[in-house]
Image (cartoon, rainbow, N blue to C red):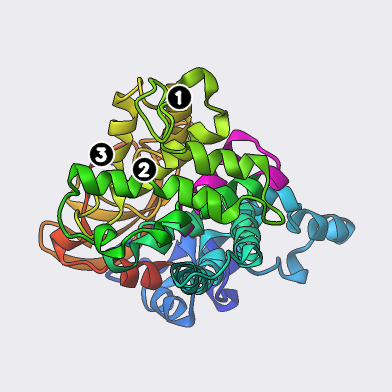
Amino acid sequence: MLITLPIAELVPGMFVDSVSKQHEHVNSIKIKTRGLVRDKTIIQRLISEGVEELLIDFTQSDVALPKKYQPKTETAKTKVEQKPAANEAPQGVTVQQEFLKASVHYEQHSRKLQSFYSDITSGLKVNVAVLDDIAVDIVSSVFRNHNALTILTRLKDKHIYNWRHMINTAILVSVFAKYLGYKEKTIKELAMGALMHDIGQAKMPQGVLSKPSALNDNEMQVVKKHVAQSLGLVKGEKGITPLMLDMIVNHHERLDGTGYPRGIAAEKLSRAARIMAIVDVYDAMTADRPHQMGEEPISALRYLLANKQLFDSELVQRFIKCLGVHPVGTIVKLNNERLALVMEGNHENPIKPKIKIFYNAKHKHHITAKDVDLSVEKELKIIASIKPLDYQLNLARLLKEHLLV
Protein backbone atom coordinates (compact mmCIF):
# COMPACT_ATOMS: atom_id res chain seq x y z
CA MET A 1 0.00 0.00 0.00
CA LEU A 2 1.41 3.38 -1.05
CA ILE A 3 0.63 6.37 1.21
CA THR A 4 1.85 9.97 0.93
CA LEU A 5 3.14 11.24 4.27
CA PRO A 6 4.47 14.61 5.42
CA ILE A 7 8.12 14.49 6.52
CA ALA A 8 7.00 15.11 10.12
CA GLU A 9 5.34 11.65 10.20
CA LEU A 10 8.33 9.75 8.80
CA VAL A 11 9.80 7.28 11.30
CA PRO A 12 12.59 4.63 11.11
CA GLY A 13 11.32 1.40 9.58
CA MET A 14 9.29 3.04 6.81
CA PHE A 15 10.18 2.25 3.20
CA VAL A 16 10.45 5.35 0.99
CA ASP A 17 9.22 4.68 -2.54
CA SER A 18 9.94 8.23 -3.74
CA VAL A 19 10.03 11.88 -2.73
CA SER A 20 6.75 13.50 -3.77
CA LYS A 21 7.48 17.07 -2.64
CA GLN A 22 10.81 18.84 -2.15
CA HIS A 23 11.30 22.56 -1.50
CA GLU A 24 12.27 24.06 -4.85
CA HIS A 25 14.55 26.72 -3.39
CA VAL A 26 16.92 24.26 -1.75
CA ASN A 27 20.19 24.02 -3.66
CA SER A 28 20.53 20.29 -3.63
CA ILE A 29 20.19 17.33 -5.92
CA LYS A 30 16.66 16.02 -6.19
CA ILE A 31 16.40 12.87 -4.07
CA LYS A 32 15.25 9.82 -6.01
CA THR A 33 16.67 6.96 -3.93
CA ARG A 34 14.23 4.28 -2.75
CA GLY A 35 14.94 2.41 0.43
CA LEU A 36 14.31 1.67 4.07
CA VAL A 37 14.72 4.47 6.63
CA ARG A 38 17.00 2.84 9.19
CA ASP A 39 17.55 5.66 11.70
CA LYS A 40 16.74 9.25 12.59
CA THR A 41 19.91 10.63 10.96
CA ILE A 42 18.44 9.75 7.56
CA ILE A 43 15.26 11.66 8.46
CA GLN A 44 17.31 14.70 9.52
CA ARG A 45 19.19 14.57 6.22
CA LEU A 46 15.92 14.50 4.25
CA ILE A 47 14.66 17.50 6.21
CA SER A 48 17.91 19.38 5.53
CA GLU A 49 17.50 18.60 1.82
CA GLY A 50 14.12 20.30 1.82
CA VAL A 51 11.95 17.20 1.58
CA GLU A 52 8.36 17.93 2.56
CA GLU A 53 6.37 14.86 1.50
CA LEU A 54 7.25 11.26 0.66
CA LEU A 55 5.48 8.29 -0.88
CA ILE A 56 5.77 5.37 1.57
CA ASP A 57 5.39 1.72 0.54
CA PHE A 58 3.99 -0.05 3.61
CA THR A 59 4.20 -3.48 1.98
CA GLN A 60 7.99 -3.14 2.27
CA SER A 61 8.09 -1.24 5.57
CA ASP A 62 9.06 -2.71 8.94
CA VAL A 63 6.36 -0.67 10.69
CA ALA A 64 2.60 -1.01 10.42
CA LEU A 65 0.39 1.37 8.50
CA PRO A 66 -0.66 4.15 10.93
CA LYS A 67 -4.27 3.76 12.07
CA LYS A 68 -5.25 7.17 10.68
CA TYR A 69 -4.50 5.89 7.16
CA GLN A 70 -6.19 2.50 7.50
CA PRO A 71 -9.54 2.21 5.68
CA LYS A 72 -12.14 1.80 8.43
CA THR A 73 -13.96 -1.01 6.64
CA GLU A 74 -10.79 -2.94 5.83
CA THR A 75 -8.75 -2.59 9.01
CA ALA A 76 -8.93 -6.29 9.87
CA LYS A 77 -8.18 -7.32 6.31
CA THR A 78 -5.11 -5.06 6.20
CA LYS A 79 -3.76 -6.60 9.40
CA VAL A 80 -4.22 -10.11 8.00
CA GLU A 81 -2.51 -9.19 4.76
CA GLN A 82 0.47 -7.73 6.60
CA LYS A 83 1.11 -10.99 8.45
CA PRO A 84 3.02 -13.27 6.06
CA ALA A 85 2.25 -16.95 5.85
CA ALA A 86 4.98 -19.34 6.99
CA ASN A 87 5.81 -20.36 3.44
CA GLU A 88 5.98 -16.75 2.28
CA ALA A 89 8.73 -15.65 4.67
CA PRO A 90 11.00 -13.93 2.10
CA GLN A 91 8.22 -11.38 1.51
CA GLY A 92 7.65 -10.87 5.25
CA VAL A 93 11.25 -10.91 6.51
CA THR A 94 13.78 -8.67 4.80
CA VAL A 95 17.39 -9.70 4.37
CA GLN A 96 18.32 -6.91 6.80
CA GLN A 97 15.93 -8.25 9.44
CA GLU A 98 17.22 -11.81 9.10
CA PHE A 99 20.89 -10.88 8.78
CA LEU A 100 21.33 -9.85 12.42
CA LYS A 101 19.99 -13.16 13.71
CA ALA A 102 21.73 -15.15 10.99
CA SER A 103 25.15 -13.58 11.60
CA VAL A 104 24.99 -14.31 15.33
CA HIS A 105 23.89 -17.89 14.74
CA TYR A 106 26.49 -18.39 12.01
CA GLU A 107 29.31 -17.60 14.42
CA GLN A 108 27.74 -19.70 17.17
CA HIS A 109 27.40 -22.67 14.84
CA SER A 110 30.98 -22.25 13.63
CA ARG A 111 32.24 -22.42 17.21
CA LYS A 112 30.08 -25.48 17.96
CA LEU A 113 31.38 -27.23 14.84
CA GLN A 114 34.96 -26.39 15.79
CA SER A 115 34.42 -28.09 19.18
CA PHE A 116 32.58 -30.94 17.45
CA TYR A 117 35.51 -31.41 15.06
CA SER A 118 38.05 -31.31 17.91
CA ASP A 119 36.07 -33.90 19.90
CA ILE A 120 36.17 -36.33 16.98
CA THR A 121 39.89 -35.73 16.53
CA SER A 122 40.31 -36.56 20.23
CA GLY A 123 38.46 -39.86 19.79
CA LEU A 124 35.01 -38.95 21.11
CA LYS A 125 31.79 -40.20 19.51
CA VAL A 126 29.78 -38.10 17.08
CA ASN A 127 27.21 -35.96 18.89
CA VAL A 128 24.39 -36.09 16.33
CA ALA A 129 22.17 -33.86 18.51
CA VAL A 130 24.56 -30.91 18.01
CA LEU A 131 24.34 -31.28 14.23
CA ASP A 132 20.58 -31.70 14.37
CA ASP A 133 20.15 -28.42 16.24
CA ILE A 134 22.35 -26.61 13.72
CA ALA A 135 20.53 -28.12 10.74
CA VAL A 136 17.11 -27.12 12.13
CA ASP A 137 18.31 -23.55 12.70
CA ILE A 138 19.84 -23.27 9.21
CA VAL A 139 16.69 -24.52 7.48
CA SER A 140 14.47 -22.21 9.56
CA SER A 141 16.61 -19.22 8.59
CA VAL A 142 16.57 -20.23 4.92
CA PHE A 143 12.78 -20.38 4.96
CA ARG A 144 12.54 -16.93 6.59
CA ASN A 145 14.91 -15.32 4.08
CA HIS A 146 17.48 -17.44 2.25
CA ASN A 147 19.68 -14.48 1.29
CA ALA A 148 20.96 -13.69 4.81
CA LEU A 149 22.83 -16.96 5.45
CA THR A 150 23.91 -17.23 1.80
CA ILE A 151 25.65 -13.86 2.09
CA LEU A 152 27.57 -15.13 5.12
CA THR A 153 29.02 -18.03 3.10
CA ARG A 154 31.07 -15.40 1.23
CA LEU A 155 33.20 -14.69 4.33
CA LYS A 156 36.58 -16.39 4.08
CA ASP A 157 39.14 -17.63 6.61
CA LYS A 158 41.63 -20.31 5.61
CA HIS A 159 42.44 -21.07 9.26
CA ILE A 160 38.94 -22.37 9.99
CA TYR A 161 38.10 -23.83 6.60
CA ASN A 162 37.12 -27.31 7.81
CA TRP A 163 34.13 -26.31 9.95
CA ARG A 164 33.24 -23.30 7.80
CA HIS A 165 32.99 -25.75 4.90
CA MET A 166 30.61 -27.89 6.96
CA ILE A 167 28.25 -25.02 7.72
CA ASN A 168 28.53 -23.39 4.27
CA THR A 169 27.64 -26.56 2.40
CA ALA A 170 24.68 -27.10 4.72
CA ILE A 171 23.46 -23.57 3.96
CA LEU A 172 23.95 -23.89 0.21
CA VAL A 173 22.33 -27.32 0.06
CA SER A 174 19.32 -25.99 1.99
CA VAL A 175 18.96 -22.93 -0.24
CA PHE A 176 19.27 -25.03 -3.40
CA ALA A 177 16.87 -27.73 -2.17
CA LYS A 178 14.27 -25.10 -1.26
CA TYR A 179 14.65 -23.61 -4.75
CA LEU A 180 14.16 -27.09 -6.25
CA GLY A 181 10.93 -27.50 -4.31
CA TYR A 182 11.91 -30.06 -1.66
CA LYS A 183 9.78 -30.23 1.48
CA GLU A 184 11.20 -28.79 4.69
CA LYS A 185 11.63 -32.20 6.34
CA THR A 186 13.75 -33.47 3.43
CA ILE A 187 15.75 -30.24 3.32
CA LYS A 188 16.67 -30.77 6.97
CA GLU A 189 17.93 -34.27 6.09
CA LEU A 190 19.98 -32.82 3.24
CA ALA A 191 21.42 -30.17 5.58
CA MET A 192 22.42 -32.92 8.02
CA GLY A 193 24.07 -34.88 5.21
CA ALA A 194 26.04 -31.78 4.24
CA LEU A 195 27.16 -31.14 7.83
CA MET A 196 28.48 -34.71 8.05
CA HIS A 197 29.85 -35.23 4.55
CA ASP A 198 33.48 -34.52 5.50
CA ILE A 199 33.63 -35.26 9.24
CA GLY A 200 36.02 -38.16 8.57
CA GLN A 201 38.67 -35.53 7.86
CA ALA A 202 38.90 -35.05 11.63
CA LYS A 203 40.53 -38.49 11.69
CA MET A 204 43.08 -37.58 9.02
CA PRO A 205 46.64 -36.36 9.75
CA GLN A 206 45.93 -32.65 10.30
CA GLY A 207 49.36 -31.71 8.93
CA VAL A 208 48.26 -33.05 5.54
CA LEU A 209 44.99 -31.12 5.58
CA SER A 210 46.70 -27.87 6.58
CA LYS A 211 49.60 -28.24 4.16
CA PRO A 212 50.20 -24.82 2.51
CA SER A 213 50.98 -26.34 -0.90
CA ALA A 214 49.27 -28.82 -3.23
CA LEU A 215 49.09 -32.43 -2.00
CA ASN A 216 51.19 -35.13 -3.66
CA ASP A 217 49.73 -38.46 -4.81
CA ASN A 218 50.44 -40.27 -1.53
CA GLU A 219 48.85 -37.49 0.49
CA MET A 220 45.80 -37.49 -1.78
CA GLN A 221 45.37 -41.23 -1.18
CA VAL A 222 45.38 -40.54 2.57
CA VAL A 223 42.78 -37.77 2.22
CA LYS A 224 40.51 -39.97 0.09
CA LYS A 225 40.12 -42.28 3.08
CA HIS A 226 38.06 -39.61 4.82
CA VAL A 227 34.93 -40.95 3.10
CA ALA A 228 35.25 -44.33 4.80
CA GLN A 229 36.11 -42.59 8.07
CA SER A 230 33.00 -40.40 7.82
CA LEU A 231 30.82 -43.43 7.18
CA GLY A 232 32.34 -45.29 10.12
CA LEU A 233 31.72 -42.38 12.48
CA VAL A 234 27.98 -42.02 11.79
CA LYS A 235 26.73 -45.42 10.62
CA GLY A 236 24.37 -46.91 13.16
CA GLU A 237 23.96 -43.66 15.11
CA LYS A 238 20.39 -42.71 16.04
CA GLY A 239 18.80 -40.29 13.57
CA ILE A 240 21.10 -41.09 10.65
CA THR A 241 19.04 -41.81 7.50
CA PRO A 242 19.89 -43.57 4.22
CA LEU A 243 19.75 -40.18 2.46
CA MET A 244 22.46 -38.79 4.74
CA LEU A 245 24.65 -41.87 4.25
CA ASP A 246 24.22 -41.59 0.48
CA MET A 247 25.49 -37.99 0.53
CA ILE A 248 28.48 -38.93 2.70
CA VAL A 249 29.52 -41.93 0.61
CA ASN A 250 28.95 -40.52 -2.87
CA HIS A 251 29.67 -36.79 -2.88
CA HIS A 252 33.11 -37.36 -4.47
CA GLU A 253 31.76 -39.68 -7.17
CA ARG A 254 31.43 -38.30 -10.70
CA LEU A 255 29.03 -39.04 -13.57
CA ASP A 256 31.77 -40.56 -15.76
CA GLY A 257 32.99 -42.93 -13.06
CA THR A 258 36.27 -41.09 -12.36
CA GLY A 259 35.38 -40.15 -8.79
CA TYR A 260 36.07 -41.95 -5.53
CA PRO A 261 35.92 -44.06 -3.39
CA ARG A 262 34.15 -46.62 -5.62
CA GLY A 263 34.33 -45.06 -9.06
CA ILE A 264 30.63 -45.57 -9.73
CA ALA A 265 28.98 -43.80 -12.67
CA ALA A 266 25.85 -41.75 -13.38
CA GLU A 267 23.24 -44.52 -13.33
CA LYS A 268 24.09 -45.34 -9.69
CA LEU A 269 24.25 -41.75 -8.41
CA SER A 270 21.16 -40.34 -6.70
CA ARG A 271 19.96 -36.77 -7.08
CA ALA A 272 21.00 -36.01 -3.50
CA ALA A 273 24.57 -37.19 -4.21
CA ARG A 274 24.68 -35.08 -7.39
CA ILE A 275 23.48 -32.00 -5.48
CA MET A 276 26.07 -32.56 -2.75
CA ALA A 277 28.85 -32.95 -5.35
CA ILE A 278 27.98 -29.60 -6.95
CA VAL A 279 27.73 -27.72 -3.64
CA ASP A 280 30.90 -29.33 -2.22
CA VAL A 281 33.02 -28.31 -5.22
CA TYR A 282 31.50 -24.83 -5.42
CA ASP A 283 32.22 -24.01 -1.77
CA ALA A 284 35.69 -25.57 -1.86
CA MET A 285 36.65 -23.55 -4.95
CA THR A 286 35.37 -20.23 -3.58
CA ALA A 287 36.81 -20.60 -0.06
CA ASP A 288 40.27 -19.62 1.14
CA ARG A 289 42.13 -22.82 2.06
CA PRO A 290 45.64 -23.48 3.43
CA HIS A 291 46.98 -24.23 -0.06
CA GLN A 292 44.96 -21.81 -2.19
CA MET A 293 43.09 -18.51 -2.25
CA GLY A 294 39.42 -18.81 -3.10
CA GLU A 295 38.18 -18.01 -6.59
CA GLU A 296 35.25 -15.75 -7.34
CA PRO A 297 31.87 -17.55 -7.61
CA ILE A 298 31.60 -16.97 -11.36
CA SER A 299 34.81 -18.99 -11.92
CA ALA A 300 33.51 -21.91 -9.87
CA LEU A 301 30.16 -21.83 -11.69
CA ARG A 302 31.94 -21.81 -15.06
CA TYR A 303 34.00 -24.84 -13.99
CA LEU A 304 30.88 -26.78 -12.96
CA LEU A 305 29.10 -25.84 -16.19
CA ALA A 306 32.08 -26.75 -18.39
CA ASN A 307 32.50 -30.24 -16.89
CA LYS A 308 29.29 -31.90 -18.01
CA GLN A 309 30.96 -35.31 -17.88
CA LEU A 310 31.49 -34.88 -14.14
CA PHE A 311 28.47 -32.97 -12.85
CA ASP A 312 24.76 -33.14 -13.62
CA SER A 313 24.42 -30.30 -16.16
CA GLU A 314 20.69 -29.81 -15.57
CA LEU A 315 21.27 -29.40 -11.83
CA VAL A 316 24.26 -27.11 -12.43
CA GLN A 317 22.14 -24.82 -14.60
CA ARG A 318 19.46 -24.70 -11.92
CA PHE A 319 22.11 -24.09 -9.25
CA ILE A 320 23.29 -21.05 -11.23
CA LYS A 321 19.71 -19.79 -11.52
CA CYS A 322 19.26 -20.34 -7.80
CA LEU A 323 22.41 -18.47 -6.71
CA GLY A 324 22.74 -16.12 -9.66
CA VAL A 325 25.81 -15.56 -11.81
CA HIS A 326 26.97 -13.19 -9.07
CA PRO A 327 25.64 -14.69 -5.80
CA VAL A 328 24.47 -12.56 -2.89
CA GLY A 329 27.38 -11.22 -0.86
CA THR A 330 29.55 -10.81 -3.96
CA ILE A 331 31.13 -7.42 -4.70
CA VAL A 332 30.67 -6.43 -8.35
CA LYS A 333 31.93 -3.63 -10.55
CA LEU A 334 29.44 -1.73 -12.72
CA ASN A 335 29.84 -0.02 -16.07
CA ASN A 336 29.61 3.38 -14.34
CA GLU A 337 32.79 2.83 -12.29
CA ARG A 338 30.90 1.99 -9.11
CA LEU A 339 31.19 -1.03 -6.83
CA ALA A 340 28.10 -2.71 -5.40
CA LEU A 341 27.18 -5.51 -3.05
CA VAL A 342 24.80 -8.11 -4.49
CA MET A 343 21.79 -8.21 -2.14
CA GLU A 344 19.22 -10.41 -3.85
CA GLY A 345 19.32 -12.77 -6.81
CA ASN A 346 17.02 -12.78 -9.84
CA HIS A 347 15.86 -16.28 -10.74
CA GLU A 348 14.38 -15.11 -14.03
CA ASN A 349 17.49 -13.22 -15.14
CA PRO A 350 20.56 -14.28 -13.09
CA ILE A 351 22.75 -11.45 -14.43
CA LYS A 352 20.32 -8.79 -13.17
CA PRO A 353 20.28 -9.03 -9.34
CA LYS A 354 19.33 -6.40 -6.80
CA ILE A 355 22.42 -4.56 -5.57
CA LYS A 356 23.55 -1.88 -3.13
CA ILE A 357 25.99 0.60 -4.68
CA PHE A 358 28.48 1.84 -2.07
CA TYR A 359 31.85 2.75 -3.64
CA ASN A 360 33.35 4.96 -6.36
CA ALA A 361 35.97 2.72 -7.98
CA LYS A 362 37.45 5.50 -10.11
CA HIS A 363 38.25 7.83 -7.21
CA LYS A 364 38.48 5.02 -4.62
CA HIS A 365 36.17 6.25 -1.90
CA HIS A 366 32.91 5.20 -0.28
CA ILE A 367 29.70 6.92 -1.33
CA THR A 368 26.18 7.11 0.09
CA ALA A 369 24.71 3.64 -0.33
CA LYS A 370 21.95 3.23 -2.90
CA ASP A 371 19.71 0.22 -3.57
CA VAL A 372 19.29 -0.59 -7.26
CA ASP A 373 17.36 -3.31 -9.09
CA LEU A 374 19.36 -4.07 -12.25
CA SER A 375 16.30 -5.58 -13.92
CA VAL A 376 14.75 -2.08 -13.77
CA GLU A 377 17.85 0.10 -14.29
CA LYS A 378 18.53 -0.98 -17.86
CA GLU A 379 21.59 1.24 -18.41
CA LEU A 380 23.55 -0.22 -15.48
CA LYS A 381 25.37 -3.51 -16.03
CA ILE A 382 27.74 -5.69 -14.05
CA ILE A 383 31.07 -5.94 -15.87
CA ALA A 384 33.01 -8.04 -13.35
CA SER A 385 33.05 -9.51 -9.88
CA ILE A 386 35.94 -8.28 -7.78
CA LYS A 387 37.85 -9.50 -4.74
CA PRO A 388 37.47 -7.22 -1.71
CA LEU A 389 41.24 -6.97 -1.27
CA ASP A 390 41.56 -5.48 -4.77
CA TYR A 391 40.15 -2.28 -3.26
CA GLN A 392 41.31 -2.84 0.35
CA LEU A 393 37.73 -3.58 1.39
CA ASN A 394 36.80 -5.62 4.44
CA LEU A 395 33.79 -7.72 3.44
CA ALA A 396 32.76 -8.57 7.01
CA ARG A 397 32.76 -4.86 7.92
CA LEU A 398 30.84 -3.98 4.75
CA LEU A 399 28.14 -6.51 5.53
CA LYS A 400 27.69 -5.17 9.06
CA GLU A 401 27.59 -1.59 7.81
CA HIS A 402 25.00 -2.18 5.10
CA LEU A 403 22.92 -5.06 6.48
CA LEU A 404 22.70 -4.77 10.26
CA VAL A 405 19.45 -3.04 11.19
* Residue type at tag 1: Ile
Please tell me whether mark 1 or mark 2 is closer to you in this view: 1
Out of 88 and 215, give the one closest to the viewer: 215
- Dividing the picture into quadrants, the one containing residue 69 is bottom right
Q: CA distance from mark 3 to mark 1?
A: 27 Å
Relative side of 331 to 19, left or right: left
- Mark 3 or mark 1, earlier in chain: 1
Please tell me whether mark 2 or mark 3 is closer to you in this view: 2
* Residue type at tag 2: Tyr
Numbered disc 2: secondary structure: helix
Numbered disc 1: secondary structure: loop
Q: Is residue 212 magenta?
A: no
User: Callout 2: 10 Å neighbours few (<14), some, many (20+)?
Assistant: many
Q: Residue at x 42, y 62 (%)?
A: 202
Q: Residue at x 48, y 78 (%)?
A: 39
Q: Which residue is mark 1?
A: 264
Relative side of 363 to 69, left or right: left
Q: Which residue is mark 3?
A: 299
Q: Position of residue 20 (x, y in %)?
A: 49, 59
Please tell me whether mark 3 or mark 1 is closer to you in this view: 1
User: Callout 3: 10 Å neighbours few (<14), some, many (20+)?
Assistant: some
- Mark 2 or mark 3, earlier in chain: 2
Residues at circles 2 and 3 in contact by the CB criterion of under 8 Å: no
Q: Residue at x 43, y 27 (%)?
A: 317
Q: Which mark is residue 282?
A: 2
Q: Position of residue 106 (x, y in %)?
A: 49, 68
Q: What span is colored magenta in the figure?
A: 167-186
Q: CA distance from mark 2 to mark 3?
A: 9 Å
Out of 351 and 272, give the one closest to the viewer: 272
* Residue type at tag 3: Ser
Q: Is residue 330 visible?
A: yes
